[in-house]
Amino acid sequence: MLQKHVFCLIVLSALFAACGSEKNNGQEAADSNAVVTNDTISNKNILFFGTSLTAGMGLDPSEAYPALIQNRIDSLKLPYNVINGGLSGETSAAGKGRIDWLLKQPIAVFVLELGANDGLRGIKVTETTKNLQSIIDKVRAKYPEAKMVLAGMQVPPNMGNPYASDFKNMFPTLAKNNNMVLVPFLLENVGGVPKLNQPDGIHPTAEGAKILADNVWLKLKGIL
């Protein structure tokens, strides 16, 4: 079990290293793809803000986990629209600068999936925490009634046990301090499982994305 967990984290390391090398050409072009699925006037918006995992890199847009969550919302006839604000290679510092553009749209629910690229770069946990807190503060300042969800991530043990522990604990601490719903580990049951990843071995397949959607939906459904 321990060996499987370590393998999962090593694969996770490769995933985010690759994400960082495939950054999209420009913030404006990426954000222009952050589209709302349905009618933004009659429905409330759920903004998923994160990395290539959220963007659904290598998948059809309809197969990314935020789109799968929209399907569940529609099947239950809930009044919410999903906005996919994922961007390949995104760091917490870059996200802090990008969030303002996306907040031009009204937000009822905010799902934050950032930080792992910081971890793979060895950025101090205190700095990543500061950036994530700034993003949370910006959302809350503009939309104080918005409900907040935080997706937890992990770094591989080769980053050093103290760093890996501090990084992992950053997410539940932020969630608790900001009254956010926590998804403990977004890649639970997917990271390190070959059949659930694309040929590159690092990005989830369509089947893997379904499990990511399950992991998020388990926590998200209670606040919709």
Image: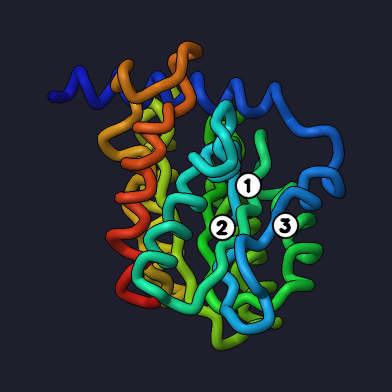
Which picture quadrant has residue 198? top left
Answer with mark 1 or mark 3, whichever residue precedes in sequence.
1
Give the residue pinned by disc 1: 86
Looking at the image, can residue 124 be seen? no
Q: Residues within 10 Å of mark 2 (few under 14, many from 20)?
A: many
Rendered image coloring scheme = rainbow
Q: Do the residues under discs 1 and 2 have CB atoms within 8 angstroms?
A: yes
Q: Nearer the viewer, residue 156 or 142?
A: 142
The residue beneath circle 3 is 96
Q: How many residues crowd mark 3 within 10 Å: few (<14), some (14–19), many (20+)?
A: some
What amino acid is found at the position of numbered circle 3 in the picture?
Lys
Furthest-left residue in this view: 1
Whole-number angstrom distance, CA of label 2 to CA of label 3:
14 Å
Q: Which residue is mark 2?
A: 48
- Quarter of the image where one finds residue 186: top left
Between disc 2 and disc 3, the foreground one is: 2
Query: Residue 195: x, y in percent?
Result: 31, 18
Which amino acid, mark 2?
Phe
Quarter of the N terminus within the rendering: top left
Q: Earlier in the sequence, mark 1 or mark 2?
A: 2
Q: CA distance from mark 1 to mark 3?
A: 13 Å
